[in-house]
């Protein structure tokens, strides 16, 4: 009997051959470990170019500084926003397994295009002529620009699909009906961020150095080979994966509930179309879900009536629908309520990611004006993220193996530090990062003025380690917020919408990058007139008012944190957040 239970099928999951996934054979940490290795390679391939792309566009494609910064934020924003497409397809039509493979191939094709263009001088604009320094360099245009952006946005499409499927695929491998499975899933998310940082470590050191010293064709080439290598490694874990069966479009459910609630609230409530209240006359086949008690016994919890939160949605089930196609179950209504409740948390993290966008743009340009020598070694400015990356790689295991167990014993709760608390810590760190960035920029410009180098392109006599401070704070903020968001969305979301919900973590990054572009444009429009140049428009960074921009970001981040506190305070976790006092005493 014990062997039979051990080898029983996972309900709602199949293996890579589309046969029922079996307990003891599919899923678990072994299956998730393949995902972690692939994440190292995937993020290396993506970040190796994204972190240094602003300099490539500026120096080789001859974009102005602001245009190059906006092009990078638009590219990265699009890549992360497309994670929603990857998550949607994983929930609705395909498995996360298939979405990763398709997306990796698409990213590979985009990188091939970029590698070919970087290698061929005829596919890039002509080099700047030092004899005509007063004339602007010719910016890439026409077919060459089309090839550049086609390659970039094929990469963005592939990255989006990967981001929208890979984390969810790994998290699907664990049994959430047992404390051990939930603990392993939490560990997975922490190490997912660790592996993301591990790939970033190679990207911003080795690959960036190769791009700056050997040529961009080598950098793009390494990324191309890396994403290609990730495919057979991912396939090697096929026999261990359990893949969630798609349940149809989650957007259809959301649309049906919202439209049904609105139409039913407008229809006449006559005896012919009104039905009894669900509390006293439940539907013939009330929706149910399987939950686990403290004694680990599985019971069925039945929804006989909708909850009283967001009561306007209850109209979708309390009244007879106008059309049969809009007929909803109580469970569907409750699932849509969950999605609506987590959206404010998503919105509040956009500002933090707007701050993170500066690491790929203005912070790199700042470092490029400073002394980047470390002894006899000249450090590429785009390698500055190595500081937060190394810190994350140290902090992630410490957090998982020391801080969380201690917090669990103190708080007697399953997570120790709640997801929302973890996100809140990240938001506070982003505020401090912007304040530090403003003070460092003030110091950098003071050194430039005192040295008489405001109009010079020579490196300033100030070490780039000053810029590392803002990288350190923002990197720490990223660790707390990203891992917290991934686990929060996956855990809280309905099972049928988990890939899409997890993709919100990456969509928050996308919206942050887009918001950065919008804020830069608004700042330049608001501060520029016939007598004054805009804060962020001069080709010479020393003539920017970047410190004012950072102070503005600090103020906006503080207001955003106060906004977040409101929603975090009223949010109530789902029913699966059980007290762990019994478990902790065993």
Image (cartoon, rainbow, N blue to C red):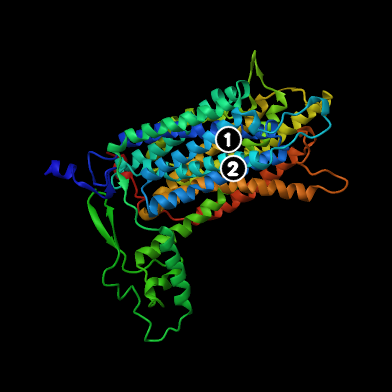
Query: Up-down: is 85 above or below 228?
Result: below
Q: Residue at x 40, y 40 (%)?
A: 101
Q: Secondary structure at mark 2?
A: helix
Give the Cα separation between the discs numbered 2 and 1: 9 Å
Q: Position of residue 58 (x, y in %)?
A: 69, 34
Marks 2 and 1, the one that precedes in the sequence:
1
Do the residues bearing badges 2 and 1 touch, measured as CB atoms within 8 Å? yes
Residue on which disc 1 sits: 50
Q: Residue at x 74, y 23 (%)?
A: 459
Is 65 on the left or on the right of 479, as rendered? right
Q: Position of residue 240 (x, y in %)?
A: 28, 37
| Residue 128 can be seen, yes or no | yes
Neighbor class of circle 2 (other Cα within 10 Å; few <14, some 14-19, many 20+) is: many
Which residue occupies the extreme bottom position in the image? 271
| Residue 204 can be seen, yes or no | no
Q: Position of residue 59 (x, y in %)?
A: 69, 30
Based on the displayed image, in which of its 4 quarters is residue 376 positioned? top right
Q: Which residue occupies the foreground of this view, 444 or 105?
A: 105
Neighbor class of circle 1 (other Cα within 10 Å; few <14, some 14-19, many 20+) is: many
Q: Residue at x 77, y 23 (%)?
A: 458
Q: Which mark is residue 85?
A: none
Q: Secondary structure at mark 1?
A: helix
Query: Up-down: is 96 above or below 282?
Result: above
Identify the image quadrant of the C terminus.
Answer: top left
Q: Position of residue 492 (x, y in %)?
A: 41, 52
Is 158 on the left or on the right of 170, as rendered? right
Residue on which disc 2 sits: 75
């Amino acid at each position: 009997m014990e062997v039979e239970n051990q080898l029983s099928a996972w309900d709602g999951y199949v293996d890579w051959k589309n046969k029922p996934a079996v307990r003891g054979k599919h899923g678990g940490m072994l299956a998730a470990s393949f995902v972690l290795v692939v994440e190292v390679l995937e993020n290396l391939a993506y970040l190796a170019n994204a972190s240094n792309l602003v300099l490539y566009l500026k120096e080789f494609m001859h974009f102005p500084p602001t245009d190059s910064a906006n092009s990078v934020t638009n590219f990265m924003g699009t890549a992360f926003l497309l994670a929603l497409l990857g998550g949607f397809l994983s929930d609705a039509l395909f498995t996360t397994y298939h979405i990763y493979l398709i997306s990796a191939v698409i990213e590979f094709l985009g990188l091939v295009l970029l590698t070919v263009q970087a290698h061929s001088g005829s596919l890039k604009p002509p080099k700047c002529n030092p004899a005509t320094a007063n004339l602007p360099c010719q910016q890439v245009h026409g077919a060459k620009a089309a090839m550049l952006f086609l390659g970039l946005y094929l990469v963005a499409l592939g990255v989006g699909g990967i981001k929208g499927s890979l984390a969810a695929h790994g998290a699907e491998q664990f049994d959430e009906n047992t404390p051990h499975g939930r603990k392993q899933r939490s560990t997975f998310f922490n190490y997912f961020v660790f592996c993301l940082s591990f790939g970033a470590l190679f990207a911003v050191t080795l690959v960036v150095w190769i791009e700056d010293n050997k040529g961009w064709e080598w950098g793009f080439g390494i990324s191309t080979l890396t994403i290609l290598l990730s495919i057979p490694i991912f396939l090697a874990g096929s026999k261990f994966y359990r893949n969630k069966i798609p349940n149809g479009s989650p957007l259809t459910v959301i649309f049906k509930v919202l439209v049904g609630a609105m139409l039913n609230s407008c229809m006449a409530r006559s005896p012919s179309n009104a039905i009894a209240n669900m509390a006293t006359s439940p539907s013939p086949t009330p929706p149910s879900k399987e939950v686990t008690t403290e004694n680990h016994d599985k019971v069925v919890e039945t929804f006989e009536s909708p909850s009283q939160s967001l009561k306007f949605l209850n109209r979708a089930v309390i009244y007879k629908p106008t059309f049969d196609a809009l007929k909803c179950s109580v469970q569907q209504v409750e699932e849509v309520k969950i999605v609506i409740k987590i959206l404010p948390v998503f919105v509040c993290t956009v500002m933090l990611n707007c701050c993170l966008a500066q690491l790929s743009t203005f912070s790199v340009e700042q470092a490029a004006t400073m002394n980047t020598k470390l002894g006899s070694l000249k450090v590429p400015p785009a390698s500055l993220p190595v500081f937060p990356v190394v810190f994350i790689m140290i902090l992630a295991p410490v957090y998982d193996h020391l801080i969380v167990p201690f917090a669990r014993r103190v708080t007697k709760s399953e997570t120790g530090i709640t997801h929302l608390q973890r996100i809140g810590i990240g938001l506070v760190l982003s505020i401090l990062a912007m304040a530090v960035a403003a003070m460092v920029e003030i110091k950098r410009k003071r050194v430039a003025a005192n040295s008489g180098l405001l109009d010079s392109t020579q490196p300033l006599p100030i070490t780039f380690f000053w810029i590392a401070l803002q990288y350190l704070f923002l990197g720490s903020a990223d660790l707390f917020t990203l891992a917290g968001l991934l686990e929060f969305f996956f855990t809280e979301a309905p099972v049928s919408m988990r890939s899409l919900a997890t993709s919100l973590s990456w969509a928050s990054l996308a919206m942050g990058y887009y918001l950065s572009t919008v804020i830069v444009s608004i700042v330049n429009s608001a501060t520029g007139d016939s007598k004054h140049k805009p804060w962020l428009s001069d080709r010479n960074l020393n003539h920017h008012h970047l410190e004012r921009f950072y102070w503005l970001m600090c103020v906006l981040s503080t207001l955003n944190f106060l906004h977040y506190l409101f929603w975090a305070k009223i949010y109530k976790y789902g029913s699966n957040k059980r007290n762990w006092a019994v478990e902790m005493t065993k």
